[in-house]
Image (cartoon, grey):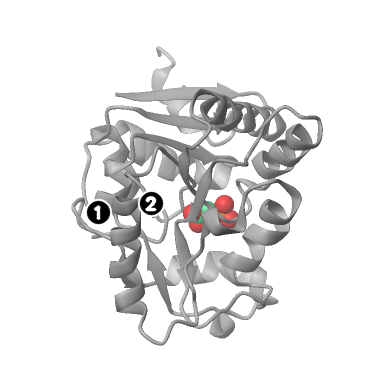
Amino acid sequence: MTDVRIFGSYDEMSVFAADYVARKIDEDPSLVMCLPTGGTPEGMYENLVRMYKRGKVNFSGVSILNMDEYCGLGRWDPQSYQYYFHEKLLDHVNVKSENVYMFDGCSADPTKSCADREELIEDLGGIGLTVGGAGRDDHVAFNMRGSRFDSRTRVVRLSEQTIADNCRYFLGVSESVPKYAMTIGIGTLLDSREVMLLANGTHKSAAVRRAIMENPSEECPASALQLHARSLWALDEAAASELLVSATPS
Ligand code: PGA
């Protein structure tokens, strides 16, 4: 069942998402989480760091995995997702370094790294909570259109839309955006015991409508969440605007 929560602003959505994560950690101090990068979750991370500094959340027992990474970008590349995680969360909270599992974008064998990631998830007892975002072209993690719902962690080629959307992090130069990435699969995501997806802004409203209101289809990877027993979308009003239009009686 997909639950949808709509908030008046990005800030409210972010506070909700951080509270949600903190509550889940409180319920299970050794929670295994798979977490996203990108602009959308920045507010959630800011709130989590603030809550940690006030003693409201304790990361000492949790394990953190990231959900995707560009091929070719390493820990110290400011555009790598590993760098992002350290900057936004890991360097500010008490998560133990041995419980942090980041994709190595510079792996000599990305295909093997992806297979290792699946094994790792199994060894950790599965993912308890995955938090994700959604792309304008319906991707979730880096699962592009056409990703099978039973896909596992693997190397993918990024869509032109995703490259165009992400080139803002590469001084606007789309040629600088890596063309390949490692990502957890849709099947990996669906195996997570709980999933929360975040989206804000009108630029996400069509993707959100397709993901939530249209029949699940591999052409819309984010729609796979409809097949999950415990999935939740947290949206601001702008991202939800096409849902609200659909729900308003004429
Ligand atoms: P964004 O990216 O949070 O930067 O919009 C989301 C995504 O591409 O999954």
**Residue 129 percent location from the top left of the image:** 43, 38
Name the quarter where the C terminus is drawn. top left
- Disc 1 or 2, which lies upstream in sequence? 2
Left or right: residue 2 compared with residue 233: left
Q: Can residue 157 be seen here?
A: yes
Within 10 Å of disc 2 (Cα), the crowding (few <14, some 14-19, many 20+) is many
Q: Which mark is residue 167?
A: none
Residue in the picture at 61% in, 58% down: 97
Estimate the x, y position of residue 226 in percent, counting from the top left.
28, 33
Q: Position of residue 54 (x, y in %)?
A: 81, 30
Q: Would the CB of label 1 be found within 8 Å of ligand 1? A: no
Q: Is residue 144 visible?
A: no
Relative side of 57 to 27, left or right: right
Residue 209 located left or right of residue 224: right
Q: Establish if 221 lies above or below 170.
A: above
The answer to whether the residue labelled 1 contacts the one labelled 2, judged by CB atoms less than 8 Å apart, is yes
Horizontally, is 149 left or right of 71 in the view?
left
Q: Nearer the viewer, residue 159 or 140?
A: 140
Provide the secondary structure element on which disc 2 rests.
Answer: loop
Along the line of sight, which residue is nearer the eye, 4 or 193?
193
Residue 219 location, quadrant: bottom left
Residue at screen point 27% across, 36% down:
214
- Residue at 18 percent across and 53 percent down: it is 150
Q: Give the Cα distance between marks 1 and 2.
A: 8 Å
Q: Amino acid at mark 1?
A: Glu
Quadrant the N terminus occupies: top left
Q: Position of residue 5 (x, y in %)?
A: 50, 23
Ligand 1 positioned in quadrant = bottom right
Name the residue that disc number 1 marks.
Answer: 219
Q: Which residue is mark 2?
A: 138
Q: Quadrant of residue 43?
A: top right
Q: How many marks?
A: 2
